[in-house]
Amino acid sequence: MTRVMTFLTRRRGGKGWHWTDIVTWVWLIGGLVIMFGPAVWLVGSSFKTPAGLAEFPPTILPYATEEVTVEGYDEPLPLFEVTLEDGSTAILAEARRIGLVAQMIDPNDPGEPVPVNINDRSPVRELSFEIDNYTEPFVHFDFLQYLYNSVFVTVMATIITLVVNSMAAFALSKYKFTGRNLVMFLILATLMVPLSVILVPLYSVVSALGLFNSLWGVILPTVATPTGVFLLRQYMLTIPDELIDAARMDKASEWQIYWRIILPLTAPALAVLAIFSVVWRWNDFLWPLIVLSRKELYTLQVGLNVYAGELNVQWHFILAMTVVTMIPVVLVFVFLQRFITTGIAGAGLK
Amino acid sequence: MSAISDIGDKTGAALAASVKWAAGIIDPPLRWLQKKAGFNGMAAFFLAPNMLIFGIFILVPMVINFAYSMTGGGALFLPDRVFVGGDQYGRLLTCSDYSRPITCTEDQFWIAVRNTAIFVVVQVGLMIVLALTTALVLNKSLRARSFWRAVFFFPVLLSPVVVGLIWRWILQRQGLLNYILFQFGIEPTVWLTDRFWAFVAAVGVSIWAHMGFYALILLAGLQAIPKDLYEAAEMDGTRPARVFWRITLPLLGPNLLVVLVLALIRAVQIFDEVFVLTGGGPGTSTLFITQYIYEIGFASVLRNPGLAAAASILMGAVLVVLTLIQLGVGRRKDPKEAAK
C-alpha cells in the first residue's frame, strides 16, 4: 500500500497530495479529538469547583475567580477587571451586588465602594485545581474502602488465575491421559457461555457456599478462565518435550518440572494473561453488582455507579473518582501497551 | 527516586524468595504423591484446582440453569422451587401479535429483544466500517504509528462505568456537546432523556468504547498480507481502489469474518456501559436483554429467577450459534484465533 502510494504521488509530480492522504489526516485528527477529547475533558472537569462545573461557556482547564481578603470584610472577595467611566481599567473587589449594580472597592485602598454596572466588568481568573474533589470522597465517603476492595479483588483474582490456569495448561499440554479431550471439550464449550448467561444459577451456587456479600464471591467465579487456559496451553505446546524428559532423567519431580522449567519458559504468556486479568477484574461490574449488596464491600466500579445514580449527583466528586478509577488502567496502557496489542492481535484476547 | 526503586527491588526480592520457599516446601509431599500416582497421575493433580473452580462456578451453574428455567416461584435454592415444565418459556414467547411487543405476556422481554436486535445490526454494522477504515489508515506509512494506534485503542481498556460516566457528563443538559452545538446555533437537547437520542447515544458510546479493539485485529490482518502482491499491482499501475477491492478485501476476508462474529457476540450481551449511561431509559428505549435478565432475576420487586433463567437460556442459544460459526471460521484460518 505504502509503495503504491509513493508511486502514485510521485507520478503526480513531487510531493503532491492524493485524496487518500487527506482522508488519512482528517481521520487521524478527528480520531484524536473524539477518542482522547472526552478523557481530557473528564480530567479537566474533575479539578473544577461545583461553581466551575456549572459555568457556561465551559473551559477545558479549571479556572476560578481570584479572591482577595480586604480589611473590614470577613469573607474573601472576588476580584474583577472593571472598565471605569473615564475609560481606564482597574482591578477591584466586589463587596456586594444588588441587581445589575455591584459595589466595588479597591483592595489596596479600601475606601467608599464605587457602584459599577456588572456589564462593565469581567472576573479575574486564575488556574486553580480543586484538590478537595479528590480528598473529600476518600476522607468523608467510603471511597478508600472501595479502592481497597477493588485492589484486593484484582490482585487476588490475578494471582489465583495465573496459578490455577498455568497448572491446568501444563497438564493439558504435556501429559497424555484418558479424558484429556473431554476436559478440552468442556473448556471449549464454556467459551460460548459468558457469565451473563448463568447469572441466576451462579448466584444460587455462590449463596449456597456462603459467599454472597463476600469479596471471594466476586473473585472465585472469575478465576478459572477458559481463555487463560487456552492461551497458556498454546504457548506451552511450543516448549520442546525433550526438556521435560531430560529433567526426569535428572530425577526432577513433576512439580519441579512445572515450577523450575515450564513456568519460567512461559513467562511472556503469563505476563500477557496477568495484564489482561488485572484489567478485566478491575473493570468488572455486573457480577460484583449482583454479589455485593453491602456498602462497605462495594468495589470502585459499583460504588461509583451507586453514587452517580443518587438523585443529587455531586458531579465534582463523581468526576474525580472516575479519574481515580481510570488511573490503574491508564498506567497499564502507557507502560504495557506492547503486551496488550500482541495479546489482542495474536490471540484475540479481550 | 532511586530510594523508591530500591524499596521496590527489595520487596520484589523478598516476595520472590518467599514464593520460592513455599514452592520448595510443597515439593516433598508432592514427590510422595508422584510415587503413588505415577507421572500421568500428576496430571490430575495439576488439573484439580482449575477443574474444581471451573466445575463449581461454571459447569454446575450451566447445567442447573436448565433446571431453574423449568421452575417457578421466588425461592432461591433449587430444591425449594416448584416444577412448572415449559411454562416460563411459554410466558416469554406468548404474544397475540408478534409485531407488537405490547401484546406479549412478557412485553418487557420482547421490547428488550427488539431493542437488542436493532442495536446489534446498527452497532456492529457501523463499528466494522469504522474499524476497517481506521485499520486502513493506520496501515499507511505513518510517522509515530504506535501513537496513533494508541489513540484509537485507548478507550477499549476503560471500564464500562468510566465510559458511561464520561459520556453522561458530556451529554447532560449543560454538557460539552450542547455547548459545541450551541456554537453552531443548534438548540440544546437533553440527549439522554429523549427516547431516540438515548438509543443513538447507546450505539455511539459502545462504538467509541470498542471500535479500537476490532481495528487492532484488522490492522494485524492487513500487515499479514504479503507485500509482493502490492508490488506486483504497482508494476501494473493498478489504481488504489482496484487494489483495495481485488487484493486487500479478499485477503482480509477471514479476519473480517472473525471480527464480525466477535462483535455480534458482544453486541448481543450489551449491558454495563449502557446501564450506567441511561439505566435502560428513558422508559424502555435502551432496555437490552442482559438488563432484562438482571432486572427480572435480581433487581425487580417481582423477582422471578425461573423467568430470568429461561430468558438467559434463549440468549445463550443465540450466542452458541454465533460462537460455533466463529470457531468454524477461526479453525479454517488459524488455530490461535480460535482461542477466544
Image (spheres, rainbow, N blue to C red):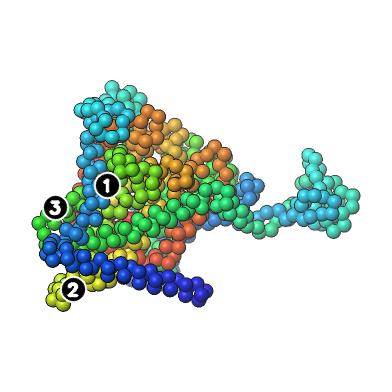
Q: Give the left or right position of residue B200, taking residue A163 as reference.
A: right
**Residue type, numbered disc 2:** Ala
Mark 1: few/some/many CA within 10 Å (<14, 14-19, 20+):
many
Q: Which residue is mark 2?
A: A252
Residue A260 visible? The answer is yes
Report the front residue among A208 and A319. A208
Q: Position of residue A248 (x, y in %)?
A: 15, 73
- Label 3 is placed on what type of residue? Leu
Q: Residue visible at 32% across and 41% down? A: A207
Residue B100, above or below B325: above
Give whichever of B145, A74 is nearer the camera: A74
Q: Which mark is residue A182?
A: 3
Query: Residue placed at 87% from the left, 54% from the top?
Result: A110
Q: Which mark is residue B57?
A: 1
Taking B61 as reference, is A119 left or right?
A: right
Which circle, 1 or 3, is nearer the viewer? Answer: 1
Q: How many marks?
A: 3
